[in-house]
Each structure stands twice: as C-alpha cells, then as structure tokens.
Image (tube, grey):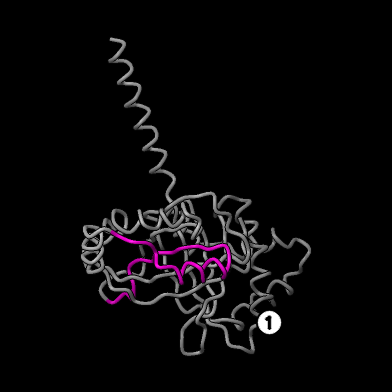
Amino acid sequence: MKRLLTLVLVILMTLSLNAQNNSSQLYLLFEFMQVKGENGSDYQQVEEFWSGIHKQRVADKSILGWDLWSLTPSGTKQGSQFLTVTLFSSLENMLKAINSLDVYGYAKKAYPTKTDKELNAMFDKTGKSRDMANQVLFKMVDEVTSDFDMKVGTIATLDIMKQLDDSYEKVESEIFKPWHKQMVDQGKKGNWGLLRAILPAGSEAYGTHITFSMYKDEAQLAAFMEDSGGTMDLITQLAVKDGLKTREWKEVKMAKLIMTMK
C-alpha cells in the first residue's frame, strides 16, 4: 500500500509539473521596421516614447516584455534596419494586442502630464519615421536555458528557416539542440532557441521558423564564428547531413539589443 501511495504521488507530481510546463508557453510578436537614413533620429525618439507605453503594458501584465534590436546587414536593399520583439504569455493576449490594443489609453497612463496634442504629435511622428515592413507571430517550441543575462549590447543571430519536412522540429531538438547546449555549457554562446511562425503561414510564406543564438557582445560572437565547433562522430555527422535536408536555410541576420523593457 505504501509503495502504491508513493507511486500515485509521483504520478500526480509529474502531471502537475507537465501542466505547469504546458502553461508557461512563450509567444513573440516580431515587427520588422524599415527606416530611411534621414528619419533615424526621429525613429529613436519614437521608440523611446513607445518604451514608456510598453513599460505600462508590462506593469499591467498584458505583456511580459518588449525589446528593440538593430539589424545587420542593414543596407537599403537588404530589408529592415530594426526589429521590435514583444513577449506574451498566451496566444490570446498576443492576438488581442494586435487587434484591439488601446494604444491611446496606455499612452495616457504612461504620460499623464502630456496633452492630447502632444500625444497625437508623437503618434503622427511614429507613422512618418518608419514603415512596419513585416509582422510575424511566433511560438517558442524549444530552447537551451541558462543564466545568461540579456542586457543592452547583447548580440543575437537570427537564422530564418523554411521547413521542408514535418520532422524538422524533431531534428532541431534531437540533433542540433544538444550541440547548441554544449556550446552554451562551454560559455561559447549565451543561449539558443527555436521559434515556429504562427502567422503568416502557407506555402508562400518566406520562412516557417527562426533559430536564434545570443552572445554577450561582438567579441564572443566573433570567437564563436572563428571556432571549428568541435568534432563529431560518424553517426552524428550522418544525422546532421540528413537533418539539413528537412529545411531550407533562407538567411541569417545579426541583431544588437539597443533597448529593453521587462
């Protein structure tokens, strides 16, 4: 009887932990911004203004956090120059924010001393300073966790992938994730994660996933890029070769964290 009670307790604890893990999903809204050179200073002022709004949203627990990243390469023919990332605890919260966010209400909370005229001027400057080129909704599906502290100046690499086979996510988790974990454990990178695009979707979507890695600065990234990455046994090499066939590597961007709110 004692063994039976112990077994039941273990099962209940396992179910409880699984429920907690399933309820702690992370959803991310990526918004890619195109900013012309002459609008650079205005855009910085705009994002500083919006950071106050996002701070209020964090305080109200409608979002978990918000970041502003500069992107490289950033030539006029290479797409967006900046990326904002908003973090949510649920898909429902993310969809509500996209479709029914009371921006003006949050602005009044964040800046109670500003007049309606001043707030409207900032909203007008927002529209003129940048073009929101792309908006992508993501779900975090796997990651390597660590005690890495994401501070201003953090460097991230964003590898945009196009899934070619249904086994792609399994390949990332079972073949590539252990290697990334080894790099994290050795202090060669801060962390790693796999994001699945929720929207836009379909055969015409540019990418289906993003894998990201974070580094404390450019020096750590440079050291990682110049490293051989270690050796692999034959079985692992064959698994990697087959794994690469499950996705098309579209491109990689480097991002630098220039503002964060959490």
Residue at 75%, 61% in the rendered image: 112
Residue at 40%, 42% in the rendered image: 21
Image quadrant where residue 165 sits: bottom left
Query: How many other residues sit within 10 Å of disc 1, few (<14), some (14-19) or many (≥20)?
Result: few
Position of 91 relative to 77 (above/below): above
Which residue extends farthest top?
1
The location of residue 59, given as percent across then percent down, is: 63, 51
Along the line of sight, the residue nearer the viewer: 194 or 111: 194
Residue at 32%, 15% in the rendered image: 5
SS category of the residue bearing label 1 = helix
Which residue extends farthest right?
113
Along the line of sight, the residue nearer the viewer: 187 or 90: 187
Along the line of sight, the residue nearer the viewer: 54 or 143: 143
Give the residues in magenta: 204-232
Quarter of the picture containing the N terminus is top left
| Residue type, label 1 | Ser
The location of residue 250, given as percent across then percent down, is: 34, 76
Is residue 194 rendered to the left or right of residue 131?
A: left
**According to the image, label 1 marks what residue?**
41
Image quadrant where residue 211 sits: bottom left
Position of 95 relative to 252 (above/below): above
The location of residue 129, given as percent across then percent down, is: 61, 82
Q: Was residue 214 drawn as part of the magenta stretch in this picture?
A: yes
Image quadrant where residue 69 sits: bottom right
Is residue 237 rendered to the left or right of residue 100?
A: left
Q: Was residue 92 drawn as part of the magenta stretch in this picture?
A: no
The location of residue 4, given as percent across then percent down, is: 28, 15
